Amino acid sequence: MTPLTRYVLFVAALMVVVGVAVNPDRFRVSALNGDAVVSRKPARDIPSMASAPSHVWRGVLGASAIDDGPQGDLTATGGDGRITLWQLPDEKPVREIDAGAGFQVTLVRFVPGAAAVAGSGLVADGTGSIRLFDSATGSEIRRVDQQEPVVFMDFDLSGRYIVFTTLTTIKVWDLVEDRAVSVVSKTSQDAVGVFFLDDRYVLQSAPVSLYDWKNRKNAAGLNDIGVVDVKKVNRDLYAWLASNGLHTLRSPYGTREFVPFDTQGIAAFDLSPDGRWGVFLKRNKTMVLVECATGLTVQTVSFASQPEGVSISRDGANAFVVYGEGTVEVFGVGNENVFRKVRFQASRLFEKLWAGIEDVAKRRPWVSATPG
């Protein structure tokens, strides 16, 4: 065995030992509770969640908003005066977009059918704004300013129309004509609006109601749910977290389902794209993974400090836990993510080893870093 080979093996073994000592949970994923049965299916049929984050994104000052790209290639976070784009497995941002001084981005959304990302929120002078940026260059391509802070927004499938909620109204805005084409008063202070049923209606929460925005009239149905929180998981799945449990509705022309369980102490939630499971962030520094057919908790993850929000990626493979101090933790979900960080760390290890070999070659000219 040559000195160079012994050097490489020694460095590799040393880095593995140090890595396990620093983070013993790196190669471990929380298991579910034995052979417990959930909704007449073994618990192993419900995906597990990693006990520790696979990646940590830092420096997202005032982070309170996150959205996963339609292709799953990018994730956007919003904060104080900027929108940041990320791409796993990198832990450094792909791009930082200057959203404007004094502009607090409280919600981010990728624009359907366009290589663009939008941020909404409030400006330092107390007004509101929605700003669209080219996701490749970061340049601003459109702005919709309002007299009130914008607390929520949702795009239609074409990306032409946006429905946004201010303090007192819900508006549908035509981005091509740059004007409001429909305006409706909010049913309550906490209500927000999203597009519903192939974008034909605006669904308003708290309490739930439907509005035909093209014909400018109220529509019947869904007005019997008292809502605490609403989540548009995707164009085919909507969920409401009420005091008595979880309500889900599949669109278009789907069925409403209700699962009773204790919702006290839940600060935020999101569901998987298929609606089989969800993550519920509690105010006691824990997050539970729940099987939605029964409302039973199958796993609990604890945190050192209280997160502010949680979001599941569009493919259901990751849960993003957002902290207000500027950190986003990425938790892998499902068996396909068990070795995600292992592969990532192995890639980093190989890069460091190769750099070490090249360094030895430079200091010892008779050792070649190129095979052969």
Image (cartoon, rainbow, N blue to C red):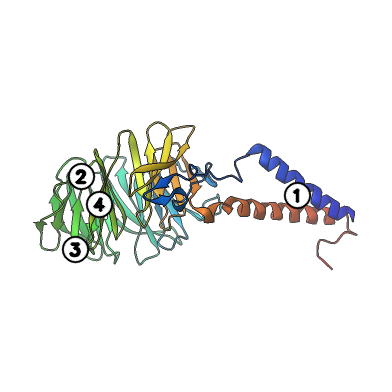
Q: Earlier in the sequence, mark 3 or mark 1?
A: 1
Mark on residue 191?
Answer: 2
**Image coords of residue 118 (percent x, y):** 35, 55
Q: Earlier in the sequence, mark 1 or mark 2?
A: 1
Snapshot quadrant of residue 358: bottom right
Which residue in the structure is indicated by mark 1? 12
Snapshot quadrant of residue 183: bottom left
For the question of whether residue 102 can be seen, the reply is no
Specify few, some or many for label 1: CA neighbours under 10 Å numbering under 14, 14-19, or 20 or more: some
Which residue in the structure is indicated by mark 4? 257
Q: Earlier in the sequence, mark 2 or mark 3?
A: 2
Assign the N terminus to one quadrant of the image. bottom right
The alpha-carbon separation of the residues under discs 2 and 3 comes to 19 Å
Task: Choose mark 4 or mark 1, whichever is in front.
Answer: 4
Assign the C terminus to one quadrant of the image. bottom right
Q: Earlier in the sequence, mark 4 or mark 1?
A: 1
Q: Earlier in the sequence, mark 2 or mark 4?
A: 2
Q: Earlier in the sequence, mark 3 or mark 4?
A: 3
Which residue in the structure is indicated by mark 3? 200
The alpha-carbon separation of the residues under discs 3 and 1 comes to 59 Å
Residue type of the residue flagged with mark 4: Glu
**Image coords of residue 353 (percent x, y):** 75, 53
Q: Is residue 187 left or right of residue 141?
A: left
The alpha-carbon separation of the residues under discs 4 and 1 comes to 53 Å
Specify few, some or many for label 4: CA neighbours under 10 Å numbering under 14, 14-19, or 20 or more: few
